[in-house]
């Protein structure tokens, strides 16, 4: 730059140019930090966030936080997953605790709220918001200070609650978190000068009693594998063998799994009790076994085994035992 402006008649030194550019960088940094505090009317807005807070037993632990922007009343809930179904369940618990629904909720651009690479809302999140009558708002990219109330609460929770404490397990973490939440809502807030519980009486939230319960139905497209199962959240669910290789729709609604091909329900199961479980209906397994017996097989190749090798022939009951007995539906 110094060479370019010299060619245009500038006679000053390189040091003068460097000092001037430094003032520009400082002014840019100052402007980037400028934030106008925005106070909202009672019941108008809540802010929500989801943050990873550590690991327990090798598993990531997250915290969901929602804070009412007027009263600063706080709700927290620890989770093991960041699935949309978990986010919606946290919202439902938060609304019950806060005593109603705010007019809008401000988020960052998390994938559970806005579809990645798009300004479109996640369809399930949009459906949930429409059912409860609140507007979904997100801050501008790289402007997290827009939702500074909940951002400060995340830092406050990490410093005031998590830092230096020990927990016997996830349940203990959640129990201690509920105790800390009550203490946080009873303290005098540094900005408002009031206790959140006191200001909460002035909030004007939409009562939950005016709404019918919301039931989430997650939909996932899956392909039936060669063994006659579809996978969902690391668990496997059986379908009749004639659908092997076909694309189906797997619907999770509360504690039930439904598998559809077009408008036809081809299988229904209870939700697996743990990740990685195999949930099968006996008639599906038996039908798969009959199908396998009737298939035309190629001639068995001639393979010579040493004395140390052996071929184990297992009965069908062994494979059935791999599935959870308590998950097999009548």
Image: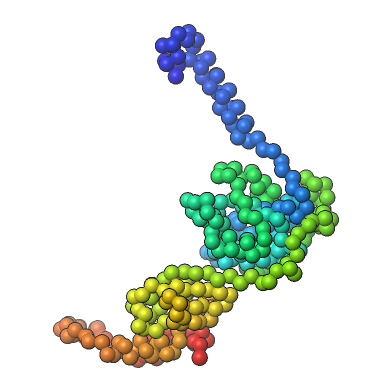
Image quarter of residue 177: bottom right
Query: x and y percent of residue 229 in the render?
Result: 40, 78
The answer to whether residue 105 is visible is yes
Q: Residue 225 placed where, x, y %?
A: 36, 75
Which residue is at 53% across, 81% downward? 270
* Residue 199 vs residue 208, the one in the foreground: 208
- Colouring scheme applied when the structure was drawn: rainbow
In depth, the one of 27 and 220 nearer the eye is: 220
* Residue with the most extreme front position: 263
Residue at the (71%, 52%) spot, across then down: 45
Is there any visible trace of residue 186 in the rendered image?
no
Give x and y (percent) for residue 92: 67, 66
Question: Residue sitting at 59 percent across and 43 percent down?
Answer: 143
Say if 56 sits above or below 16 in the image: below
Q: Is residue 134 above or below residue 11?
A: below
Quadrant position of residue 313: bottom left
Task: Describe residue 88's horizontal placement relative to residue 264 as left or right.
Answer: right
């Amino acid at each position: 730059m110094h060479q370019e402006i010299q060619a245009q008649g500038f006679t000053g030194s390189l040091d003068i140019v460097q000092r001037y550019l430094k003032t520009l960088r400082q002014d840019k940094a100052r402007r980037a930090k400028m934030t106008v505090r925005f106070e909202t009317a009672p019941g108008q807005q809540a802010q929500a966030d989801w943050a990873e807070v550590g690991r327990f037993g090798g598993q990531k632990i997250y915290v969901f936080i929602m804070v009412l922007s007027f009263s600063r009343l706080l709700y927290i809930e620890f989770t093991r997953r960041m699935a949309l179904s978990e986010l919606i369940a946290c919202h439902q618990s938060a609304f019950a605790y806060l005593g109603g629904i705010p007019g809008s909720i401000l988020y960052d651009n998390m994938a559970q709220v806005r579809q990645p690479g798009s300004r479109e809302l996640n369809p399930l999140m949009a459906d949930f918001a429409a059912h409860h009558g609140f507007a979904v708002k997100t801050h501008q990219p790289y402007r997290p200070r827009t939702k500074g109330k909940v951002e400060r609460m995340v830092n406050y929770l990490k410093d005031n609650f998590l830092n230096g404490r020990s927990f016997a397990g996830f349940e203990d973490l959640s129990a201690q978190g509920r105790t800390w939440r009550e203490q946080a809502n009873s303290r005098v807030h540094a900005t408002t000068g009031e206790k959140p519980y006191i200001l909460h009486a002035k909030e004007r939230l939409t009562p939950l009693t005016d709404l019918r319960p919301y039931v989430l139905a997650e939909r996932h497209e899956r392909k039936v594998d060669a063994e006659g199962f579809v996978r969902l959240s690391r668990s496997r669910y059986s379908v009749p063998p004639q659908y092997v290789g076909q694309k189906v729709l797997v619907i999770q609604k509360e504690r039930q799994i439904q598998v559809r091909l077009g408008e036809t329900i081809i299988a229904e199961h209870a939700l697996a009790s743990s990740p990685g479980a195999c949930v099968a209906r006996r008639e599906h397994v038996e039908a798969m076994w009959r199908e396998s017996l009737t298939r035309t097989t190629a001639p068995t190749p001639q393979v010579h085994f040493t004395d140390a090798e052996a071929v184990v022939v297992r009965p069908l009951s062994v494979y059935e035992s791999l599935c959870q007995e308590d998950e097999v539906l009548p």
